[in-house]
Amino acid sequence: MFGRFLIVVLSSLIFCASAKAFGLFNLFSQSTSDAQVILSKAEGLSPEVLNLALKAYDKLRQQGYDQQQVLTIVDYSKPSTQPRMWVIDLKNLKVAFRALVAHGKNSGDDYAESFSNQPESLKSSIGVYLTSNTYVGHDGYSLRLNGLEPGFNSNALSRDIIVHPASYVSEDFAETHKRLGRSWGCFAVDPKISNQLIDSIKEGTVIFAYYPDKQWLEHSQFIGT
């Protein structure tokens, strides 16, 4: 009897250690209070979008990704003239950046309404990404991305969907033109913060690009049931 009890205890301890190593016990799985803290600091971020982003993030943590504990959320349901990118330090429950971000030229005008995974579509892609390495290219200091969702953003790397600075992303541009300029599908951000933002999310952190697309909401492996 004692031997059987000891086996059960040891098995539980081994499971707990493994779960902790893969992020199963990260703070967002344990309590919703931390999400409330984030919402209090992330002006304009929807609770629904945050909950979906944290759900996707937890699944990636369970697979051993993102040791930096940084989550970037982009909400494409908001107009380009409003800050719709949040870089969240999950370890310290801080919002590192709340920023403007452009969408693809063929995705829409002020609002993004159409998305694609196809090359040369000049559209943004929704879904879950992992950031990769930085480089200096045509657009300056930039960050490569790996799209993790087949059919939605899996061609991101081959399409050169990146995070990069752009002169058409600023409060002044938005005020003058009543929208931001548009990219070729990239996450273009204000040059004033681009270097610092890219350095804070590079090399294996999670980007969650949201839009209430029925097909994606139903079929995503990260937010589906």
Image (cartoon, grey):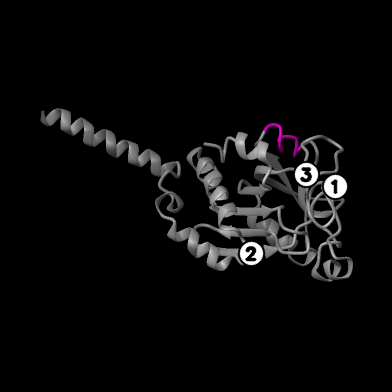
Who comes first in sequence, dot 2 or dot 1? 2
Describe the element under mark 1 as helix, strand or loop: loop
- Report which residue position mark 3 lands on: 161
- Tell me the crowding category of disc 1: few under 14, some 14 to 19, or many 20 or more residues within 10 angstroms, Cα based: many
Range of residues picked out in magenta: 150-157
In the rendered image, the residue lying farthest to the left is 1
Q: Which of 195 and 116 is in front in this view?
A: 116
Q: Is residue 185 visible?
A: yes
Task: Tell me if residue 101 is in the magenta stretch.
Answer: no
Which quadrant of the structure image shows residue 177?
bottom right
Q: Nearer the viewer, residue 198 or 31?
A: 31
- Report which residue position mark 2 lands on: 44
Q: Where is residue 27 in the image (x, y as percent from the top left)?
A: 43, 53
Which residue shows up at 83% across the image and 35% down it?
119
Q: Position of residue 88 (x, y in %)?
A: 58, 59
Q: Distance between the residues labelled 3 and 1?
A: 8 Å
> Which callout, 3 or 1, points to the residue nearer the camera?
1
User: In the image, is 31 to the left or to the right of 49?
Assistant: left
> Which callout, 2 or 1, points to the residue nearer the camera?
2
Image height of 163 relative to 1, above or below: below
Q: Where is residue 56 in the image (x, y as percent from the top left)?
A: 55, 44
- Tell me the crowding category of disc 3: few under 14, some 14 to 19, or many 20 or more residues within 10 angstroms, Cα based: many
Which residue shows up at 64% across the image and 58% down it?
200
> Which callout, 2 or 3, points to the residue nearer the camera?
2
Q: Nearer the viewer, residue 44 or 172?
A: 44
- Report which residue position mark 1 lands on: 184
Which quadrant of the structure image shows residue 31?
bottom left
